[in-house]
């Protein structure tokens, strides 16, 4: 038994020596520098603390690639360390194996958990020695779990091993580790060598992390492949450089410099469907329809948004108020652009074009018309009253002068056109003579006019005659001129109540 063990040790020494010799002749590793892409924002750091578990057990002394698997594993770990960009995070390095006897175990925390420094981590890695014996990966994982327990943020565990001659205990340890850290943890395994059973075991271990992966060490040995693996473990792509990783970015093409939410989408503060950086109307009320610029619709283009517009169909070019309604300067209920009488006094009833009513169609608006029932086609004065004029008489006379005939004929024509109209023929005098005398004289003058109209076919019931003497002068009786104006007859329509 002792000879066998001594022979095995000799074999190990030979393998290690040959491995070292091979290492000295290998071409220096030219790492891919990920720092520039990280600084440019193409990558985001997704790990806050990590741990590398390195297999230093007996099976790792087996020859592989002209040297031992142990040296091959250390080189993979070294390339990993060289390729990791300048990230501010915590790091740890744990090795496992056995020493002195097949039952003895050796699990060492070689580095950390402490601030990750590339040079220090590399020095610690070079100090890891082959331990031999069994492969207590489960114990190493349990120690790693304890090491990472105080750590905050996202965690990554990288196991570099051949997975050989290890029972299923590491799978349970991986499950326990995942239960402890939850979604914060991802487990990655790097398979060294070509043992199928070991590869299967390490794949199961990685699967318990739910977000990690198991890879063959040979597939990440080259500079670019190693950079891809480092990216997968430590970094997240951020193509649009908005600070949200591509794998959770639901708006992956956000323009540079635009602020985004936790899903990587630009903010839409007023929730109108137009992102703030495009929204020219950022304070639109909730539920209001907007155009592609984020501004509320203004269908009639009057400068008042539809949701505020109480007159949404205003014609193009019409001036409106703050409610979107056309102006109505005279407040008659007809908008200025339709109002043909824009200066109608307040409170006056108007027609559809904004003009005051003229019910008797005499040319004088109702609100000014003091005689609202003027006969059709009759001439009126500025008050809207029938301007029939007066029949003037000479002093003490009742004879109708010829120059009044045309005027009286016009009256007859109006009465004929308006058979329902009744007109009082009023007789008047000046104040020369007694009251009784002038009253009789005024009656005679009124009857003279009535008789003339009767002769034109007008019924007497339509033209009753009344004398008022000198009680209703229209001019001063102190002058000849005034008295001449008072010697007259007048026509006054009688309107039914």
Image: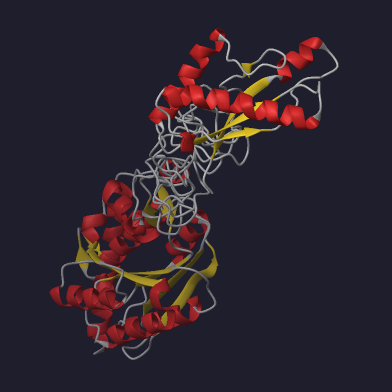
Q: Residue furthest right?
A: 478
Image: 275 above or below 211: above
Q: In percent of the image, x 55 and y 8: which residue is there?
A: 403
Measured as percent of width and height from the top left, residue 10 is found at 27, 73
Count of numbered circles in the view: 0
Quadrant showing the N terminus: bottom left
> In the rendered image, which quarter is residue 425 located in?
top right
Q: In percent of the image, x 46 and y 17: which residue is there?
A: 409
Q: In percent of the image, x 45 and y 77: which residue is there?
A: 108
Tell whether 372 sits left or right of 125.
Answer: right
Q: For residue 115, say whether it is visible.
A: yes
Give the camera-side residue of 106 and 47.
47
Q: How is the image coloured?
A: secondary structure
Give the camera-side residue of 353 and 482.
482
Q: In percent of the image, x 47 and y 38: which residue is there?
A: 461
Measured as percent of width and height from the top left, residue 59 is found at 25, 76
Image: 194 above or below 406: below
Image: 359 above or below 96: above
Give the camera-side residue of 376 and 365.
376
> In the rendered image, which quarter is residue 100 located in?
bottom left
Give the camera-side residue of 484 and 314.
484
Image: 190 above or below 143: above
Measured as percent of width and height from the top left, residue 184 is found at 42, 72
Tell whether 237 sits left or right of 243.
Answer: left
């Amino acid at each position: 038994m002792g000879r066998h063990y001594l022979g095995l040790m000799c074999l190990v020494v030979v393998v290690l020596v040959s491995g070292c010799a091979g290492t000295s002749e290998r071409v220096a590793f030219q790492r891919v520098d990920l720092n520039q892409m990280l600084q440019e924002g193409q990558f985001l750091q997704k790990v806050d603390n990590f741990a590398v578990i390195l297999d230093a057990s007996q099976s790792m002394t087996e020859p592989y690639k002209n040297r031992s698997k142990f040296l091959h594993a250390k080189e993979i770990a070294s390339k990993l360390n060289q390729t990791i960009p300048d990230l501010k995070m915590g790091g740890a390095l744990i090795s496992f194996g056995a020493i002195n006897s097949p039952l003895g175990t050796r699990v060492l925390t070689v580095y950390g958990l402490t601030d990750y420094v590339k040079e220090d981590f590399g020095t610690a890695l070079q100090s890891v020695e082959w331990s031999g014996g069994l492969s207590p990966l489960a114990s190493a994982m349990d120690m790693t779990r304890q090491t990472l327990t105080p750590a905050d943020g996202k965690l990554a565990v990288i196991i570099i091993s051949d997975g050989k001659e290890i029972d299923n205990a590491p799978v349970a340890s991986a499950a326990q580790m995942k239960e402890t850290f939850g979604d914060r943890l991802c487990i990655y395994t790097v398979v060294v060598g070509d043992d199928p059973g070991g590869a299967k075991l390490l794949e199961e271990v990685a699967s318990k992390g739910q977000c990690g992966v198991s890879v063959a060490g040979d597939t990440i040995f080259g500079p670019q492949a190693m950079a891809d693996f480092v990216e997968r473990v430590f970094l997240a792509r951020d193509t649009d450089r908005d600070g949200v990783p591509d794998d959770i970015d639901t708006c992956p093409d956000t323009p540079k410099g635009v602020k985004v939410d936790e899903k990587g989408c630009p903010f839409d503060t007023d929730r109108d469907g137009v992102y703030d950086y495009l929204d020219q109307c950022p304070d639109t009320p909730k539920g209001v329809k907007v155009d592609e610029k984020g501004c509320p619709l203004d269908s009639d283009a009057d400068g008042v948004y539809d949701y505020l517009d109480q007159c949404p169909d205003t014609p193009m070019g019409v001036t409106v108020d703050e409610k979107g309604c056309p102006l109505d300067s005279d407040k008659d209920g007809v908008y200025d652009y339709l109002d043909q009488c824009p200066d109608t006094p307040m409170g006056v009833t108007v027609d559809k074009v904004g003009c005051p009513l003229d019910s008797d169609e005499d040319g004088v608006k109702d609100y000014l018309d003091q005689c609202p029932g003027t006969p059709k086609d009759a001439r009126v004065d500025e008050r809207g009253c029938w301007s029939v004029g007066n029949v003037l008489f000479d002093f003490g006379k009742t004879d109708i002068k010829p120059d009044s005939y045309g005027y009286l004929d016009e009256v007859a024509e109006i009465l004929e056109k308006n058979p329902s109209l009744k007109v009082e023929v009023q007789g008047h005098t000046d104040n020369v003579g007694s009251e009784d005398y002038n009253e009789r004289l005024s009656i005679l003058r009124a009857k003279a006019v009535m008789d003339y109209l009767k002769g034109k076919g007008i019924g007497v019931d339509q033209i009753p005659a009344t004398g008022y003497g000198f009680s209703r002068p229209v001019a001063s009786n102190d002058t000849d001129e005034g008295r001449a104006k008072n010697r007259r007859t007048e026509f006054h329509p009688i309107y039914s109540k």
